[in-house]
Image: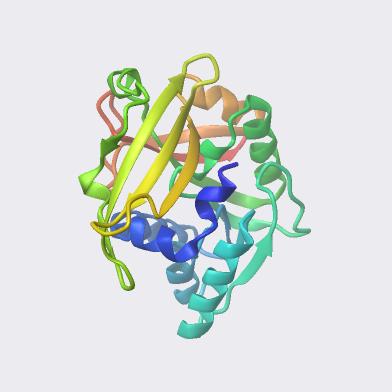
Amino acid sequence: MGEPFYSDAGLYDRLFASGKPAVDFYRAAADRRGGSVLELGCGTGNKLIPIASDSHPSVGLDLSTDMLAEARRKADELGVDVDWVHGDMRQFDLARTFDLVIVAANSLLHLHDAQDLVGCFRSVRRHLAPGGQLVFDVFNPSVRMLAQADGVRRRRDALSFVDPGRGAVHVDVAETYDAAAQVTRGTWYFSTESEADFTVLPLEIRSIFPQELPLLVSRGGLRLVERLGDWSGGPFTADSAVQLCICEPD
């Protein structure tokens, strides 16, 4: 489930700071649907806090207590009311329903087994109010990129960021791809000019290919009603980097 990678909430927020298009997409989805919102794998609340600030009753569920603590701190600082819940998206029971359930930022890809994904979709199905929707994003796997996961450590310049205490932080990643499991197994190295590898973290991410995705959703009692290919709402194509999926009860 990738827990060690999410043990430092501040590091996570600095690493993935440029998420405004995704925030805008989910915020607009909540406004169109109206009513209450549940986010699974809510992390530090980067998507859910703006949604809650638009007067949507909101619940955020996450397995990482560190991420939830930071989410609670940020929401309290902004005076935004969110119910933060420690739980596992594979199976949960919140004893209520929601008009919209979202799973953002590839969070579903921490569920490596098909049965875990189906379990998550079934739990979502039980928590959807009449007319409710599930909206989530996962990347569109590139066979070319998966083939390049050869275990060699490489610099990811696009992931560099500035840490208030350390200065410029560089990120290196070494990945291998397990084709049988459809899982990319990576090691992420964080360094500065004066402190090499001050943090080293594992991260394992599943791939969900476009043709299998509707089948997994269907086994969970949902149906894929629309799939978009970018944050502006463009159509999904073979070249799309992301699968933005809108699902309803079957």
Q: Residue at x 72, y 46 (%)?
A: 126
Say whether residue 198 is left or right of residue 167. Answer: right
Residue at the farthest left position: 157
Give the percent coordinates (x, y) of residue 213: 50, 26
Looking at the picture, tell me which residue is in the foreground, 85 or 228: 85
Give the percent coordinates (x, y) of residue 35: 56, 65
Which image quarter is the N terminus in?
top right
Residue at the farthest top position: 180
Say whether residue 25 is left or right of residue 73. Answer: left
Instruction: Judge whether 60 appears above or below 117 on screen.
Output: below
Q: Residue at x 50, y 61 (%)?
A: 8
Looking at the picture, tell me which residue is in the foreground, 75 or 98: 75
Looking at the picture, tell me which residue is in the foreground, 49 or 233: 49
Q: Quadrant of residue 117?
A: top right
Instruction: Judge whether 247 appears above or below 42 on screen.
Output: above
Give the percent coordinates (x, y) of residue 106: 45, 42
Q: Residue at x 36, y 33 (%)?
A: 174
